[in-house]
Image: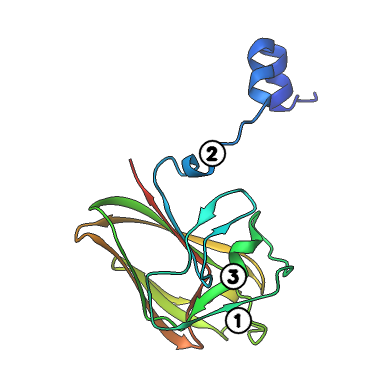
Amino acid sequence: MKLLPTCMLRAFLFPAVAVASLAIVPLPAADQAGDKAIRIKAGLSKPHTDEAGVVWQADSGFSGGDVVGREDNLAIANTRTPSLYRTEHYSMTSFTWKLPNGRYTVKLHFAETFEGITGKGERVFSYQVEGKEFKDFDIFATTGGANRAYVETVEVEIKDGQLDIAFTPKVENPEINAIEIIPVK
């Protein structure tokens, strides 16, 4: 017995509804997170609009370190927004951002794009997001290679009016490509 794809089944059972549901209307960039998300693109001195039309603020909130950019055509796997991963902030000790107290989803965007890292164990660092520890993080090992995007999602509760992220090097320097802070309703 051959099964119909879901969209065809909907069209068969509910023809008037199915036609309307096939048209996907993208949300305006400001509404995609469902609230007033804060998005920071590491490594840039001006705002950035990604391939999905989402605007990211310039590099800000980091303590220490430096920034670097890669080639504009560098291929990045595992993402529909490769431009997010072509710049980075590295060797920083922390990131802080003033926020109203409440619950947030924090998304940390990583990709190993430094040509000097060619295998597992060549960049290892730990980080803490509001006290939640991620020990011995290795981007290359986590993603299975270089130039592959990875997003770590962390649920936090802000109680002191500030998001705190600490970075601790073990091998090489910590690096990050972007940070999203999304209020939880």
For disc 2, the marked residue is 28
Which label lies toward us, 2 or 1? 2
Q: CA distance from mark 2 to mark 1?
A: 39 Å
For disc 1, the marked residue is 120
**Helix, strand or loop at disc 2?**
loop
Q: Nearer the viewer, residue 46 or 10?
A: 46
In which quadrant is the C terminus drawn?
A: top left
The residue sitting at the front extreme is: 46
Marks 2 and 1, the one that precedes in the sequence? 2
**Helix, strand or loop at disc 1?**
loop
For disc 3, the marked residue is 111
Q: CA distance from mark 3 to mark 1?
A: 13 Å
The amino acid beneath tag 2 is Pro
Which label lies toward us, 3 or 2? 2
The amino acid beneath tag 3 is Ala
Graded by Cα atoms within 10 Å as few (under 14), some (14 to 19) or many (20 or more), the crowding at tag 2 reads few
Q: Nearer the viewer, residue 31 or 183?
A: 31
Colour mode of the rendering = rainbow
Return the mark for residue 164.
Answer: none
At 63% from the left edge and 70% from the top edge, which residue is drawn?
A: 86
In which quadrant is the N terminus drawn?
A: top right
